Amino acid sequence: MIEIFKNIKNAYKILSHVANITPIMTSRTLDSITGAKRVLVKCENFQRTGSFKFRGAWNCISRIPSEEKEKGIIAHSSGNFAQAVALVATILKIKATIVMPNNATPTKIQATRGYGAEVILCGSNPGDRAKMTEELIQEREYRLVHPFDDYDVIFGAGTTAFELMSSIKPIDLLLVPIGGGGLISGCSIAAKGLDPRVKVIGIEPKNADDAFRSYQLGKRVPVENLNTIADGLRTSVGKLTFPIIQKYVDNIITVTEEQIIDAMKFYWERMKIVVEPSGAVPLAGLLSGNIDPSLIKNKRIGTIISGGNIDLSDFFTSLKQKFN
Amino acid sequence: MIEIFKNIKNAYKILSHVANITPIMTSRTLDSITGAKRVLVKCENFQRTGSFKFRGAWNCISRIPSEEKEKGIIAHSSGNFAQAVALVATILKIKATIVMPNNATPTKIQATRGYGAEVILCGSNPGDRAKMTEELIQEREYRLVHPFDDYDVIFGAGTTAFELMSSIKPIDLLLVPIGGGGLISGCSIAAKGLDPRVKVIGIEPKNADDAFRSYQLGKRVPVENLNTIADGLRTSVGKLTFPIIQKYVDNIITVTEEQIIDAMKFYWERMKIVVEPSGAVPLAGLLSGNIDPSLIKNKRIGTIISGGNIDLSDFFTSLKQKFN
């Protein structure tokens, strides 16, 4: 068993008491269309704050020495990490400031405030968030919490696969989405630590395929095209996460926007669960035909839904217009 | 314990092996906004074919003597019952014919065919379905299966509450939607049979409030206004179901279209589950302020989601247009 794996076990000792133990769902239809023996869907859309991010945020923030967090913590995020940090800080009674771009969806800003954080809006250009965050750290001495390039965040995220694999019979293959790489690096450590025979495949949108290209080239290349619906995966893979991915992930494949939307549709219509685009990316990979069929046929496959946060205001507003 | 309750227990002995044991979900937010001690959501949207209808269809069809079903069975439905009968018949190797109006959504027709039934389309006027069904029964000697006015269908549906209440600590209040009354009549027998102190409240759309008016008047009055988004509840309460409702249901309240849509939105956005409009009606009632607060405050409340079948083609088509 690999040495670094102990950190995931340690993280889970505490996390199992504060995070939701999320359900593992199955679907006869999914087994039948894939030819798998069983597809086991780990539903982090049912995690607190609606995504796996709560795990890493808790494992990181709860370990910060009190003198470092006295003045408060800060994070920048337009999405799921913002809400996770906000809730964790509220539970742990720490002041949290989240820098969000002024074009973030109002519901996400509202949710982050609702969980108890101070939200500071910045410009929507690529460098704006980091600049504003840096200024606030200088000025107010906040402690930065990084969304993925932090070992405690990685180990926390890895408890997702640990929890999945600890509660079921052995699996043969694990499918995980890749954005900054926090989830897959943690989950690949957990998977190989629990069972070295498990294959781990990362799935990435073709329209944000930096991890795929970096993995092929053996060095990090930044994300280029960003026109993907999978808003959680628009980030480039990190300095700490990339070497872990190189070491423990068996392959990376990409999927198209259409494949992502079809996978979402399957989850919503057939399995009755609300999954955000990023969360449907592994299923898109499973259904894409891009994975070696010998890894699927008659195998037990774990697939991770990273989250379920999606703005449905327009959908429900138009329903109301029809029926009022 | 009431005599008729035995039928539910008997139905469940078999159903627990063929139906899904559906999850019971909770939400910290829901407890906090209602003031309830715990709201326990019984998720029949995760039932086979996406609604509770599978339970009644199985319990009825599996008990039909073989000579009666030799020629095949027939049902008319534009929605969830069609799919349930189709799947049950396929599993039991019985020929099933479903009469559906020619304006039923293509996905529902497709799903019913997909589960293995022959679909015969009829006109979309109110009397058309019954007429076409009657003709086919005369001509081909099919056995009719009624969607709710049949004791075996009622007892099957009642296993929903039986399963809920058997697997958790006692509840104080049970909320159930009312259409034809099959679900609530079965569930009220189950609830009072297991625990006579449980209050059972039926919730109905204001725009299809025949059960509410019938209950007040003490006699059945037909449904009038039918402009409700809750397509599963547009039916009038039945001959067999109404007396059971009069006997075992403690109250009936109504909700507006806006309240139904807001409840759906809560389930989708906050609890990440896809619930059809009819299935959100009990939660709409709980949040409406129309239930005596002393029945809610600090109480344990069971609420039943009847199903999760909703046509999302338009939603996903427009997503694809945006991202391709």
Image (spheres, coloured by chain):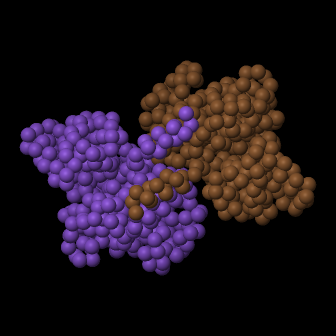
Chain colours: A purple, B brown
Residue B260 visible? The answer is no
Residue B294 placement (x, y as % from top left): 55, 20
Residue B38 placement (x, y as % from top left): 50, 33
Residue B97 placement (x, y as % from top left): 79, 58
Residue A110 placement (x, y as % from top left): 33, 37
Residue A179, by quadrant, is bottom left
Residue B163, by quadrant, is top right
B281 with respect to A318 (left or right):
right
Note whether A162 is above or below B221 in the view shown.
below
Rendered residue at 61%/46% (across/down): B307
B178 with respect to B66 (left or right):
left
Q: Residue furthest left?
A: A138
Between residue B119 and residue B314, name the one nearer to us: B314
Note whether A105 is above or below A295 in the view shown.
above
Rendered residue at 47%/26% (across/down): B35
Between residue B119 and residue A18, name the one nearer to us: B119
Residue A130 visible? The answer is yes
Note whether A35 is above or below A144 in the view shown.
below
- The quadrant of the image that shows the N terminus of chain B is top right
- The quadrant of the image that shows the C terminus of chain B is bottom left
Rendered residue at 55%/45% (across/down): B275
Rendered residue at 14%/37% (across/down): A71
A109 with respect to B127 (left or right):
left
